[in-house]
Image: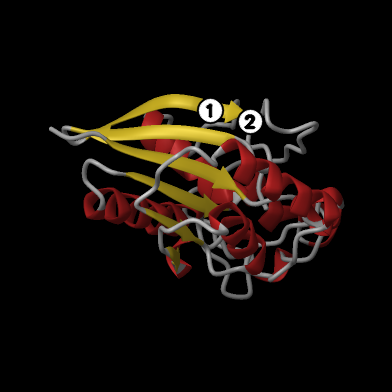
Amino acid sequence: MPITRICLVRHGETAWNAQHRLQGHEDIPLNPRGLAQAQAVATALASCEFAAAYHSDLQRAALTARTIAAHRPFPVIAEPALRERHFGALQGLTRDEAEQHYPGIYGKVRTREPFAGPPGNGESLNTFAQRISQALHAIAARHAGQSVLIVSHGGCMDIMYRIVTGKPLTEARDFALGNATLNWVEWQDQRWNLRVWDEKDHLSDCFDEISA
């Protein structure tokens, strides 16, 4: 069976990343460091042939993807299903602020309770994971035997790592989610394989946080 290779990239850094704010669906732009990180990824992937690039429709992921794909022939496709988890009323708060203002609610988010959704139309972890799983499998099926690029968010990358490795949704994260690192996975014979995770030789520095 053909091997589908997928390069997973988290968007470059934003000001809210640096401030440890929960971004969720808030449309925060890249900061200067994030723009430089996106260009570094573009340089690192310049020799890779992709059939397509898919990105979250939030601008921090969209600009990262467009920077990587600049002057390249493959299509760049906005995919809303690749958005970050919606954190509802917690969006815009730092983690300390979320703990202070919504201690019981944020505690459930922090400890990865699967069916707890923040107020204000926030997504539960389980609903979010289903959305990301469907998007990832649909892209893999669409590009059997090809290489594709996916640019999304920290929370999305967390879910995709768990899909590929079988790590339970509720277990604490013990793997990196750096901005603009390179992460390669493969889909073959209805199975996922992890090939490379958090490769950052192309970056002079790398900001890592739980989810944004």
Asked whether residue 113 is in view, the answer is no
Which mark identifies residue 178?
none
- Left or right: where does residue 130 sit relative to residue 37? left
Depth order, front residue of 163/54 = 54
Furthest residue in direction bottom, as rendered: 120
The percent position of residue 100, horizontal first and vertical second, equals 85, 56
The first of marks 2 and 1 along the sequence is 2
Residue drawn 72% across the image and 40% down it: 209
Furthest residue in direction left, as rendered: 1
Mark 1, secondary structure of its residue: strand
**Is 186 located above or below residue 51 in the figure?**
above
Separation (CA) of disc 2 from disc 1: 8 Å
> Looking at the picture, which amino acid does disc 1 mark?
Trp
Callout 2–callout 1 Cβ contact below 8 Å: yes
- Work out which quarter of the rendered image holds the N terminus and state it: top left
**Is 198 located above or below residue 15 in the figure?**
above
Crowd band around label 1 with a 10 angstrom C-alpha radius: few (<14), some (14–19), many (20+): some
- Please tell me in which quadrant of the rendered image residue 73 appears: bottom left
> Looking at the picture, which amino acid does disc 2 mark?
Ala
* Badge count: 2
Mark 2, secondary structure of its residue: loop
Asked whether residue 195 is in view, the answer is yes
The percent position of residue 9, horizontal first and vertical second, equals 55, 44
| Nearest to viewer (mark 2 / mark 1) | 1
- Left or right: where does residue 14 sit relative to residue 75? right
The percent position of residue 51, horizontal first and vertical second, equals 34, 52
Q: Which residue is mark 1?
A: 197
Q: Which residue is mark 2?
A: 176
Crowd band around label 2 with a 10 angstrom C-alpha radius: few (<14), some (14–19), many (20+): some
